Each structure stands twice: as C-alpha cells, then as structure tokens.
Image (tube, rainbow, N blue to C red):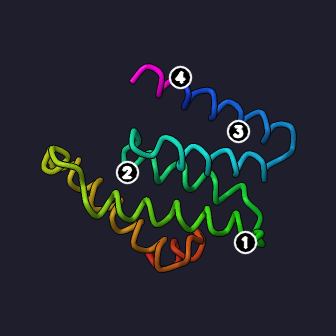
Amino acid sequence: MGRFQSALGILKRAAEIADTAGDSQLSGKIFLTILEEVKNFLSPGEITEIYKEADDRLPNVLDPENMSRLRACCSLRSRKCRYPQQGNVGGSFEQQVHQRESELISAALEEAGGSVTRAARLLD
C-alpha cells in the first residue's frame, strides 16, 4: 500500500505542476492515467474526485483517443460504485448515504456521457 500512496502522490504532483505551468490538458491526461493505472486501490469517492479533476481540465472538444479514455474512466466509476467490493457494504448511516450519493453521481455521469456539467443538471 505504501508504494501506491507514493505513486499516487507523484502523479498528483505532476498534474499540479502541469496545471501551474498552464497545460491543463496535460494535467487532465495525468488524472486519467491515475484512474487507469491505480483504480484498484481507489475508493468510489476518490474515483469521483479524480474523474472530476480530469474532466475539469480537459477541453470540451477532445480527440477520439482521450474521449474514449474519459468515457472508460466514467464507466469504471459506475461499475465500482454499483458493485461494491465484499466488506465494503454496510457501515454507518453516513457511510451508506455517501455510498448512495456516489452511485447516483456515477449513474448521472454515465447517462451524461461523462460530462460533469450535464450530470449536475440531471441531478438538480
């Protein structure tokens, strides 16, 4: 688990540096890479957060490759939230509410084709 945290920290730092340097598209691609490479270690909430970071930084018009990557990450979010891992079911009332919110956000993102703005409108 220590290597995962280290890798995650390095990738997030790289995204931050790219963003600070004015290359928000590269920053968005780095967040997509995080989702693709370390998805098995992320909670549904972390996946939601990182997906939003990627979507916020990528331009509205994406090339087919990056659009496909973004959609695949959205799909990943939906699957992980809908089918919780064994031992991840239950918990406190607050945890269950958080889990249900994640599921609703995932479903809205999937229905909106990965657009956070359209998903937010669906949830409003």
Task: Say above or below: 10 vs 98.
Answer: above
- 22 displayed left or right of 31: right
Disc 1 designates what residue? 64
What residue span does the magenta drawing correspond to? 1-5
Task: Say above or below: 109 vs 84.
Answer: below
From the image, which quarter does the N terminus lie in?
top left
Which residue is rendered at x = 71% and y = 66% of the image?
65
Q: Amino acid at mark 4?
A: Ser
Mark 1 element type: helix
Q: Amino acid at mark 3?
A: Ala
Q: Earlier in the sequence, mark 4 or mark 2?
A: 4
**Which label is found at residue 6?**
4
Task: Give how far across and how far down residue 84 sits, in percent.
Answer: 24, 55
Disc 2 designates what residue? 44
Which residue is rendered at x = 29% and y = 64% of the image?
82
Q: Earlier in the sequence, mark 2 or mark 3?
A: 3
Is residue 3 shown in magenta? yes
Graded by Cα atoms within 10 Å as few (under 14), some (14 to 19) or many (20 or more), the crowding at tag 4 reads: few
* Count of numbered badges drawn on the protein: 4
Graded by Cα atoms within 10 Å as few (under 14), some (14 to 19) or many (20 or more), the crowding at tag 2 reads: many
Q: Amino acid at mark 1?
A: Pro
- 117 displayed left or right of 61: left
- 58 displayed left or right of 110: right
| Mark whose residue sits in front, 4 or 3 | 4
